């Protein structure tokens, strides 16, 4: 119970720190709108390409991709907060105090989940205003958010692991960009894989980003195929657990070095 309570406290701490930066909060909420509006307008004609069987509009197809992409971009920066704590000496103070060690990572990762829920609700609301159809209803949208949260947990854990090992902002930023952009475009976030080269389609089968996009997109359909959704959610859970294990090992390594 102590670990849970302290993890909740650390989550609140990171959330309060975020709310003290109103401009950053505004950008965080506006950025998904820019993606949804600009990409929706730029690529809306692709639905006329033969073989693009993806619902009544490109906006319907794009919305799950934007939610997942938001999860990746937001959680990938999680390690920057860890580096701040290290540089200001807060991490060392926590380590010599009666703080449950797991809460230092769990709280930061959980904060990414809370932020993503808010961002996802904003994206969903904007999507409805722009004319998107969420035929899967509240349950379907909840599954989309769940898939995005599981992916965010994975990226946040990796980001914190890199921060604890490398302890340099430039390195964490470089690795984040190296992972996020290729994994996004090697998925069905923007276009059906049937229109992509065979090698991209093959890579996407093993891409967690694609699993999240496909699970969320299928859940938003009126007649969702749960035999497609459930295995992808299970796979995302496994990946999140593996990444959490890597973050734990990195944290133990950091403890031994200080």
Image (tube, rainbow, N blue to C red):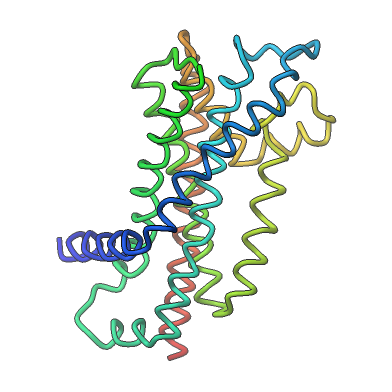
- Seen as rendered, the residue at the extreme left is 1
Quadrant in which the N terminus is drawn: bottom left
Q: Position of residue 47 (x, y in %)?
A: 72, 15
Residue appearing at x 43%, y 87% in the figure: 256
Say left or right for 177 vs 142. Answer: right
Image coordinates for residue 255, horizontal then vertical, percent: 41, 84
In the image: residue 253, left or right of residue 209: left
Figure disc tally:
0
Between 20 and 7, the residue placed more toward the observer is 20
Whole-percent x, y for residue 199 in the image: 83, 36
Instruction: Give the residue furthest to the front.
Output: 23
Q: Nearer the viewer, residue 50 or 245?
A: 50
Q: Residue at x 53, y 39 (%)?
A: 68
Compared with residue 252, is residue 131 higher up or lower down, i.e. above or below?
A: above
Picture layout, residue 248 above or below residue 116: below
In the picture, residue 13 is in which quadrant? Answer: bottom left
Residue ranking furthest to the bottom: 258
88 shown above or below 77? below
Q: Residue at horizontal 68%, vertical 31%? A: 190
């Amino acid at each position: 119970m102590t670990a849970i309570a302290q993890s909740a406290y650390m989550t609140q701490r990171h959330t309060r720190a975020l709310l003290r930066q109103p401009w950053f909060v505004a950008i965080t909420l506006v950025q998904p709108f820019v993606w949804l509006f600009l990409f929706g307008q730029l690529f809306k004609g692709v639905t006329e390409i033969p073989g693009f069987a993806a619902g009544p509009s490109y906006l319907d197809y794009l919305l799950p991709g934007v939610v997942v992409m938001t999860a990746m971009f937001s959680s990938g920066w999680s390690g920057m907060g860890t580096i701040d704590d290290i540089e200001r000496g807060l991490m060392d103070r926590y380590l010599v105090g009666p703080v449950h060690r797991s809460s230092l990572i769990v709280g930061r990762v959980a904060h990414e989940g809370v932020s993503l829920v808010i961002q996802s609700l904003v994206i969903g609301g904007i999507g409805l205003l722009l004319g998107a159809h969420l035929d899967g209803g509240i349950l379907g949208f909840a599954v989309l958010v769940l898939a995005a949260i599981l992916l965010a947990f994975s990226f946040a854990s990796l980001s914190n692991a890199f921060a604890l090992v490398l302890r340099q902002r430039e390195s964490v930023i470089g690795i984040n960009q190296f992972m996020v952009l290729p994994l996004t475009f090697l998925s069905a976030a923007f276009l059906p894989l049937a229109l992509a080269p065979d090698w991209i389609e093959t890579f996407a089968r093993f891409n967690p980003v694609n699993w999240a996009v496909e699970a969320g997109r299928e859940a938003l359909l009126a007649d969702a195929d749960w035999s497609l959704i459930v295995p992808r959610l299970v796979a995302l859970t496994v990946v999140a657990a593996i990444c959490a294990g890597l973050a734990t090992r990195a944290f133990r390594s950091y403890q031994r070095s200080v």
